[in-house]
């Protein structure tokens, strides 16, 4: 970890040193800024990073900082290496969007009190919860703002205490979630250049019957009607709730093969007793998957991928698993799972602290005035111009000092000299490591079977919110 952090810091400081000469009429384009000496011949004018070191500053005894709350986490799968994706994070710019003035006038028939939106309505801190209060959405009826009597953002509807008159204009504005639906997204790497995504979606509390009449003999899961989808076996849970209670403390869970049977191909649930009790709301939670995977998506080292799992950023490193020549070229060489949760959940523990790094630059020139001018330009640019801006990136310059000058022969036969001055820079930056609570998945089509045995060897995931 330290070498990766130090490498990034060296690149960033050298980039700033290069920028110091960009607008100079004499040195722009003539000064070479390098790490060590990659050239065979000595440069005429240049800046060389000669040495770098660092020491850790602990923030606590065990470096623990906080817990990570996010929609997403990255897990290993079975015995695959789980190295191709280094870490993931939710894309805060792509989780929610604001949909203005969705017109629901066509749903008004003079009798209807409940109206359905096209998207799930979300609200709350960071728009991470389903809208459940009238003030979390904006409803206008004939141009006047109205407060609905009920808002159920998860099921995409709201209600009025009365039926709007036929011919009225009804519009609603709300936040909706653009993050992919909750579930498990299996990343399959069949080679080190492409990967595919196999989604297994999770449906929670899908309303099958708003209020039972006692005459129902069967119901159908909504996702079963989507072309190319299949219900995962043994993942369904059917519950009867009392719809008049804000929080049902005594739900009734139906038992498969005792209370009902299910056809997973069609999603049809048939009640074995011929009917069910009256006055209940029936909801179902289950998982379903598609026949075909998404992709393939290209892979390259040190790259962020935004389009494979919308709303989730996948970050590749340099540990992408290569294909095994002894195996079938179409075989999967690595597999990882992106778990997307319905709400912000406790996903990992965050450990972190500070690194204080010392960098030593050498400023080289053929004459002493140029050497002095270049040294002064670098010190003033880093300390006087860029110091405050770098702090917004988490890079604190504690010290930028010119510490000495030397001279050495450039051409020994003629006695030509070159001159060098040293600049010492002390930089402090932060480091963080994220240890997931769930390290490995054994299955995605049944209940999660966590494996915590190797948690300290886990991959690093990204961050969104700490608490």
Image: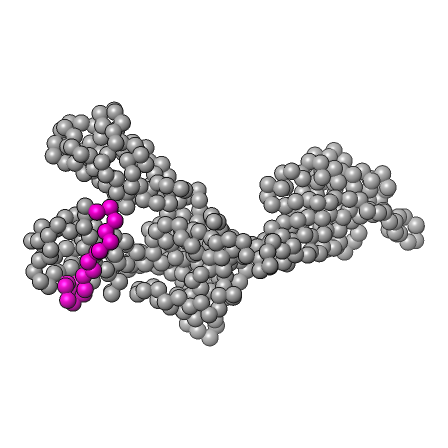
Residue 128 vs 340, above or below: the answer is above
Query: x and y percent of residue 303 in the render?
Result: 51, 53
| Number of numbered discs on residues | 0
242 vs 293, left or right, is: left
Quarter holding the N terminus is bottom right
Residue 388 sits in which quadrant? top right
Q: Main secondary structure of the magenta part?
A: loop
Identify which residue is drawn at 28% across, 46% down: 154
Query: x and y percent of residue 393 in the render?
Result: 59, 43
Identify which residue is drawn at 31% across, 41% down: 131
Q: Residue furthest right?
A: 414
Q: Residue furthest top?
A: 143
356 vs 157, left or right, is: right
Query: x and y percent of residue 416 in the render?
Result: 90, 48
Residue 193 visible? The answer is: no
Residue 446 on the magenta segment: no
Residue 259 on the magenta segment: yes
Depth check: 28 or 222 in front? 222
Depth check: 91 or 20 in front? 91
Q: Residue furthest bottom?
A: 326
Residue 245 visible? The answer is: yes
343 vs 407, left or right, is: left
Identify which residue is drawn at 18% across, 38% down: 114
Query: x and y percent of residue 354 in the render?
Result: 62, 52
Q: Which residues are magenta?
A: 245-263
Identify which residue is drawn at 22% across, 25% down: 142
């Amino acid at each position: 970890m330290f070498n990766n952090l130090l490498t990034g810091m060296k690149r960033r400081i050298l980039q700033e040193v290069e920028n110091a000469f960009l607008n100079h009429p004499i040195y722009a384009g003539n000064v070479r800024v390098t790490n060590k000496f990659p050239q065979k011949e000595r440069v005429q004018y240049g800046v060389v990073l000669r040495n770098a070191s660092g020491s850790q500053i602990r923030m606590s005894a065990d470096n623990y900082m906080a817990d990570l709350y996010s929609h997403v986490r990255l897990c290993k799968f079975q015995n695959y290496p789980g190295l191709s994706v280094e870490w993931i994070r939710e894309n805060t710019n792509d989780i929610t969007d604001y949909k203005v003035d969705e017109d629901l006038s066509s749903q008004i028939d003079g009798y209807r009190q409940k109206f359905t939106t096209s998207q799930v309505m979300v609200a709350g801190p960071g728009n991470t919860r389903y809208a459940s209060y009238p003030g979390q959405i904006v409803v206008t009826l004939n141009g006047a703002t109205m407060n609905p009597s009920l808002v159920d953002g998860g099921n995409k509807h709201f209600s009025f205490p009365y039926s709007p008159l036929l011919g009225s204009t009804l519009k609603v504005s709300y936040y909706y979630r653009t993050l992919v639906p909750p579930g498990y997204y299996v990343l399959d790497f069949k080679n080190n250049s492409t990967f595919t995504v196999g989604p297994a979606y999770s449906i929670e509390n899908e309303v099958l019957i708003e209020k039972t009449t006692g005459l129902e003999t069967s119901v159908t899961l909504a996702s079963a009607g989507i072309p190319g989808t299949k219900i995962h076996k043994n993942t369904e849970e059917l519950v009867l709730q009392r719809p008049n209670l804000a929080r049902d403390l005594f739900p009734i869970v139906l038992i498969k093969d005792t209370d009902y049977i299910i056809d997973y191909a069609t999603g049809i649930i048939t009640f074995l007793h011929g009917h069910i009790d009256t006055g209940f709301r029936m909801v179902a939670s289950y998982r379903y998957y598609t026949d075909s995977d998404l992709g393939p998506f290209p892979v390259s080292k040190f790259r962020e991928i935004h389009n494979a799992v919308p709303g989730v950023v996948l970050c590749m490193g340099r540990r992408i698993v290569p294909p095994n020549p002894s195996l079938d070229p179409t075989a999967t060489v690595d597999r990882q799972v992106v778990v997307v949760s319905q709400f912000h959940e406790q996903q990992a523990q965050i450990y972190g602290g500070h690194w204080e790094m010392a960098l030593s630059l050498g400023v080289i020139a053929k004459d002493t005035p140029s050497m002095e001018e270049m040294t002064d330009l670098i010190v003033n640019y880093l300390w006087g111009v860029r110091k405050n801006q770098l702090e917004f990136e988490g890079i604190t310059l504690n010290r930028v000092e010119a510490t000495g000058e030397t001279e050495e022969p450039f051409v020994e036969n003629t006695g030509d000299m070159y001159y060098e001055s040293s600049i010492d820079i002390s930089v402090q930056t932060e480091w963080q490591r994220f240890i997931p609570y769930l390290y490995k998945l054994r299955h995605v089509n049944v209940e999660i079977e966590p494996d915590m045995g190797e948690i300290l060897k886990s991959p690093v995931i990204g961050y969104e919110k700490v608490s």
